[in-house]
Amino acid sequence: MLLQGKKILIGVTAGIAAYKIPLLVRLLKKAGALVQVVQTPASLDFVRPIVLSTLSGNPCPSEFSSESGDWNSHVDMALWANLIVLAPLTANTLAKMANGLCDNLVLATYLSAKCPVLFAPAMDLDMYAHPTTKKNIDMLKSFGNTEIPAETGFLASGLEGEGRMAEPETIYKAILAKFSTGYLDGKTILINAGPTYEAIDPVRFIGNRSTGRMGIALAEEAAALGAKVYLVLGPSAIHVENPNILVKRVESAKEMYTLCTDIFPEVDAAILSAAVADFRPKNQSKQKIKKELGAADIALEMNPDILKTLGERKQHQVLIGFALETNDEIANAKKKIANKNLDYIVLNSLNDKGAGFGYLTNKIQIIDKQNKIYDFELKAKTELAADILNTVFQHEV
Ligand code: CTP
């Protein structure tokens, strides 16, 4: 386990989101990490040290000396830690960190640290958008610290917008990624996923049953193995929140084509798992088509083939396609490797029970460009994501 025995110090400052930090501590402890929490005095109003010390198994100081007169050494704690996480980080403490102030235990610990530091800002939307805050965040990043960006949602003020602390699970994933010594460290990967919707009019579309689950599992796994991931995602109901995945939402095949071809030159590999609609309505009505007009004939035209285009433009990149077949599976998949200039194809057949759209599981075969076939049993898409990356990248990147 990646976090087994890792020493993680969490600095808690006075944001409402401090009430979520016990959940983060639990996640880290479950993963085998050693956790030490330090609080600013003002944060004691939002989460009590008894909760954090019980969950972490360590005292949770907020002053330089305890009531018994013992010194809480910020230097010892800072040097103990393999990683420091400041969450939630208020605008006030952020500004102090950017300017080297240290009038409390959390700040003094931060300033004494030699290990990597993650910080998760949390504040109201206007404070988060303020140029001073932006400048302070940039300054912290320029010192080598890593931001876990705030999310958009309901804020304690009752307003809605950007400024909410990233969820504990997101912070946890950012911590995992920091410790990753995965074989994809330093690599950039493009993944597309989900269906595409091809508009008939503003209300109706032609689409397909893809959920995007397989591609999202690949993106999560690649990020956990250290890669920076671009995920170009069609209309999927699944929410992706991972600091190492840059999610670009699209709707149509044309939009997906534009983004994928733009991103492709800068990546080391591309995995095209999206169920791209092959055809789109030739004419898209700007207004809703009224039923009085009777059943319309919808003329279709071809969408661009994204994978084929990337195959034509391929230079150093490893290119992996998917194939969903109903008959002559292997022969058809092999044809796609040749026609689209692929390095690998992941084949799933609609004839396999529990495989394909809508299932949590899948059954695949991977075929490489030398026609070598790798077989896998029916298993969870999350496990298959690891199998696909292992098969492809252990050999290629
Ligand atoms: N693909 C693509 N752009 C398209 C159609 C497909 O990039 N317009 C990609 C898919 O993401 C997948 C691969 O091509 O990685 C194969 O998709 P599939 O639907 O199995 O095959 P098609 O090429 O569309 O051919 P057919 O539908 O005739 O089997």
Image: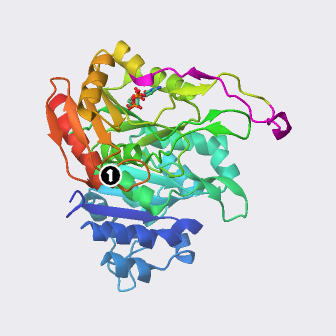
Q: What residue did someone put label 1 on?
A: 381
Residue 261 falls within the magenta-colored stretch: no
Give the residues drawn in magenta, as a range: 287-307
The image quarter containing residue 349 is top left
Residue 78, horizontal then vertical, whole percent? 31, 59
Residue 326, horizontal then vertical, whole percent? 35, 38
Classify the position of the N terminus by image quarter.
Answer: bottom left
**Along the line of sight, which residue is nearer the eye, 136 or 376?**
376
**Along the line of sight, which residue is nearer the eye, 209 or 274?**
209
Name the chief secondary structure element in magenta: loop
Task: Decide if residue 333 is on the left or right side of residue 10.
Answer: left
Query: Which residue is painted at 57% across and 76% down in the image?
Result: 45
Classify the position of the C terminus by image quarter.
Answer: top left
Q: Element under label 1? A: helix
Residue 77, horizontal then vertical, whole percent? 30, 64
- Which three-letter amino acid code belongs to the residue tagged 1? Lys
**Along the line of sight, which residue is nearer the eye, 253 or 164?**
253
Residue 241, horizontal then vertical, whole percent? 47, 51
Query: Which residue is painted at 36% across and 13% down in the image?
Result: 312
Other residues around mark 1 within 10 Å, as few (<14) / some (14–19) / many (≥20): many
Q: Name above or below for residue 323 compared with residue 17.
A: above
Task: Point out the quarter of the image occupied by ligand 1.
Answer: top left
